[in-house]
Image: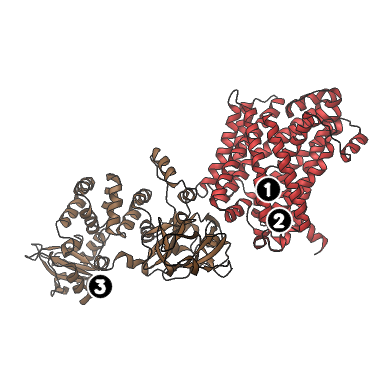
Chain colours: A brown, B red
Amino acid sequence: MPFLGELFVSEILRKPVLDPKGNVLGRVKDFVIVKGEPLPKISSLIIERKKGLFNVPWTDLNIFNKRIISAKIYSEVLQPYKLNDEDLLLVRDILDKQIVDINGVKVVRVNDVKLEGYDTEAVLIAVDVGMRGIMRRLGVERGSEDLMKLFKRHLPYNLISWNYIQTLEPKLTTISLTVPRQMLSELHPADIADIISQVSHKEGATFFKDLDVDVAAEALSELKPETQVDIISEMETDKAADIIEEMPPDEAADILSDLPMDKAKEILESIEKEEAEDIQELLSHEEDTAGGVMTNEFIAYPPETTIREAIEKFRKDAEVIETVYYIYVIDANEKLIGVVSLRDMLLADLDAKLLDIMETKLKTVGPETDETEVAEIISKYNLVALPVVDAEGFMLGIVTIDDVIDRLLPPAAKRKRRKM
Amino acid sequence: MTRWKRLLILLSIIGPGVITANVDNDAGGIATYSIAGAHFGYSLLWSLIPITIALIVIQEMSARMGAVTGKGLAALIRENYGARITFWLMAALFITNLGNTAAEFAGWAASNELFGINKYISVPISAIVVWLLVVKGTYRIVEKIFLIICLVYFVYIPAALLAKPDWSVVAIQTIKPSFQFNAAYIALFIGVVGTTIAPWMQFYLQSAVVEKGIRKEEYWASRIDVIVGCFMTDIVAFFIIVACGATLFPAGIKIDSAKEAAIALAPFAGKYASILFAVGLANASLFSASILPLATAYYICEGMGWESGVNKTFNEAPQFMWLYTILIATGSLIILIPNAPLIAIMWISQVINGIMLPFVLIFMLSLINKKELMEDYINSKTFNRIAWSTTIIMIVLTMMFVVSMFV
C-alpha cells in the first residue's frame, strides 16, 4: 500500500521520484487519471528526466506521500511516455481549468486538486477552488495563514467534492459541475460533513462557524466521533453549546462524553436547563450499551387516554420529538405496560382507549445491554425503536434504528456508496 | 450572405474594438499628443501611420484569440502557463492600472477646473457615477453608452479646423517621415508610441469579444471593428497634433499638460476651440476612468478564477465588485489628497506598464501560435513576421521610454 493519507497535487509537482537505491529517476510532471470506483484514480505518474517524459505505473510505486515518492523500478526499465489526446492528465487537463456549473455559468477555477488514499489507490477527492489553493500554488500557504492569524482570521478552505464534478473526458476546455451554482451553497448537511471530513479539523471549526445552527447541528452529527470532538474543542463554548442544544439529546450526549471533562462541563452549563438534564442522564451510561445510545425523548401516554386525546396530544408532542412511530403506554408509576404503533393509533376508533388497543408483549432491553444485542433485537423484530427499561420496569428511553445503523456502519463505508 | 445581412452583423458586432482603441486616447495620451504638436509642430504626424499599423496588428490578434477560443487572455495565460505566473502578472497589472486610474481622475479634475468646477466636487461625483454605471447597469447599456462617448472624441476635429492649419503642409508631413536627432524629439516620439499600446488593452479587448459572444464565424466583423477603432484613435490623435501644431508651435508656446493646451489655444483658435479641447479631455478621462477599473477587475477575476460580470451583485461576485470598487475609490481619493505626488504616481504606473508590455506581447504571440488552441486561425508565416517585428520594435521603444523616464 504505497499511499496513505491525503495531499494536494501542487505539493508534489516537480518532486523527485527515487529508485530503490535512492537515485533520482525523474521529477513529477503529471498524472494519468482513469475512471475508478468510487472516484477517479491515478493510474500512473509521468515524470520528466533530462527533458524526456517517462511513465511510472502506480503499481510500480513503493512510497507516495508529501515528503517522499519512490518506485520499485530502476531507470533502465523506465517506459517513455508520449503526450497524447486519449489520456486524461491531471495537470494538463484539470489544473487551472475553468469550472462551469450545470447551466454553463463560469464559476471558479481549479486551483489545486486533493488526492486521498483509498484502499491501495490514490483517488481524486476534491478540487480546491479557494484562495488557499492559489496561495499553495505560489508556495506561500503557511505564510499567508500566519498573516491572516494576525488579523484573527483563517484562510478559508474552498473545496468542491468530486461527487459534484461531471465525469471527465480527455482534452476538455472546461470542467462542469453536476449541480447549479446556487446548490453548492445549499449543500445537504451530510455533504457538508463530507467536505469537512476532508479538511483539517482546525479549519473544520472555522467552517462550522459560518453555518446556520440547525444545519451545523445536522452536519456535525454526520461526522466521525474524533472529528466531532476536534471541531467542538476548537469552537467557542457559546457557539458549541448552541449547536449541541440543537442536536437530539443522545447524539449530544455522545459528543459530550468524548470531550475532555472541563470542556463538556462548560458546554453543559451554557445549555438550557431542561435539555442539559436530559443529556446528563444519558451521559451516565456506558457508551456502547443501550443506555449509551438511547435517547430520552419519546412519546408516552397513560393507558386511560382516549385515541382522540392521544392524537390531539401527539400533534403537539411530535413537533419536538425525533422518533414518533411508537406511542408508549406507561402507568401512574411510570412503568412501561404497552405500546401502540402510530398506524394502529390512527386506524383505531376515536373513542377507544390506548389500553384497549395496546400491544403488551413488549420487547425491551436494560440500559446495560450491549449495543450489538440491541441491534440484533431491532433487526429480528423489524422495529423502528426499542424501549430501554430499568430493573423495576421504569421506562428510561428508546434506542432508534438510525442510531444503531450509525454504530454498525463505519463512517468510511458511507463514502463507498458514492459514484465517480 | 447578402450585403444587408453582413451590414447588420457588422453593426451588432461593432463595439469592443472601437471602445478599446478609443480608451487608448486617455488623459495621458491626449497630453502627449498636445505636447507633440505644440513642441514639434507637424513633424511627428508621420509616426501615426506606423503606429496605426502596429496597433491593428496587435489588437487584431487579441480579438482573434477571443473569438476562436472563447476565452480571455488572462484565462489563456492561466491555463497554459499556470497559477504562479498569472498571479504575479495580475498583481503587476493591478498596480499599474491603479496608477492609470488615478491619472484619469487627475485629467478629469483638470478639465473640470477649466470650467471652474472644483476637484473636490467633480472627482467624487464622477467616481460615484462611474461606479454606479457598472454596479447598476447591464453590459448592453454600458456598451451603448461607451460607444456614444467614443463619438465625442470627434470634438477634436472642429477644434483643429478652428486652428486654421495649412492643410497642404499637414498632408506632406503626414506621409513624409522625418526625424530629428535631439533628446526632446526622441523622448516625445517614444512617448507617442508608448502611450499607444498598453498591456491592459489586450486583456480588455479579448474579454470584451468573449463577453459579447462573438464566434469565429463572425470574426470577420470583429476584425473590421478593430481596424475602425484603431483608425478612429489615430485620427483623433492626428487632429490634436494638428490643432496644437498650427497654433502653439509657431508661437513657440511650451506646455506640460492637456489642460495647459486647452488654455493656450484660446488666444489663437478662439474660445470655442479651447472649450472643445476641454470637453475632449473631460470625456476621454472619464471614459478611461470607467473602463480601466472595469477591465482590470475583469481580467484579474478571470485569471484567478473568481466570479465576475457587470450583471453580478456583491454577493455573487465579491472579489470582482471589490476590486472594481477599490480601484475607483483609491484612484479618485489619491487625487483629492492635497499635494498628492501625482507626477510620481503616473510615472511609476507608466514604468510598470512598459515593463509588463513585453511579457504580455510574448505571451500573446506564443498563445496565438498554438495549434491546439487556435486550430486554423493561428498566425500565418507572413503575419508572424509582421507581428514579431512589431512586437520587438514596441519592446525596444517601450524600454527606451522606460529608461528615458529615469534619465
Mark linked to residue B119: none
Q: Which residue is mark 1?
A: B361
Disc 1 is attached to a residue of which chain? B
Badge 2 element: helix
Badge 1 element: helix
Q: Is residue A299 left or right of residue B93?
A: left
Is residue B3 among what the camera can see?
A: yes
Furthest-bottom residue in this view:
A380
**Which circle, 1 or 2, is nearer the viewer?**
1
Is residue B204 among what the camera can see?
A: no
Q: Label 1 to label 2, Cα distance in Å?
A: 14 Å
Badge 3 element: helix
Q: Which residue is mark 2?
A: B64
Callout 2 environment at 10 Å: few (<14), some (14 to 19), or many (20+)?
many
Q: Label 3 to label 1, Cα distance in Å?
A: 76 Å
Callout 3 environment at 10 Å: few (<14), some (14 to 19), or many (20+)?
few
Q: Is residue B108 above or below residue A341?
A: above
Which residue corresponds to the image point at 23% horizontal and 52% vertical from the top-left?
A: A259
Q: Which residue is mark 3?
A: A343
Which residue corresponds to the image point at 31% horizontal and 64% vertical from the top-left?
A: A411
Res. B284 image quadrant: top right
Amino acid type indicated by mark 3: Arg
Instruction: Give yes or no for contact between labels 3 and 1 (Cβ–Cβ under 8 Å).
Output: no
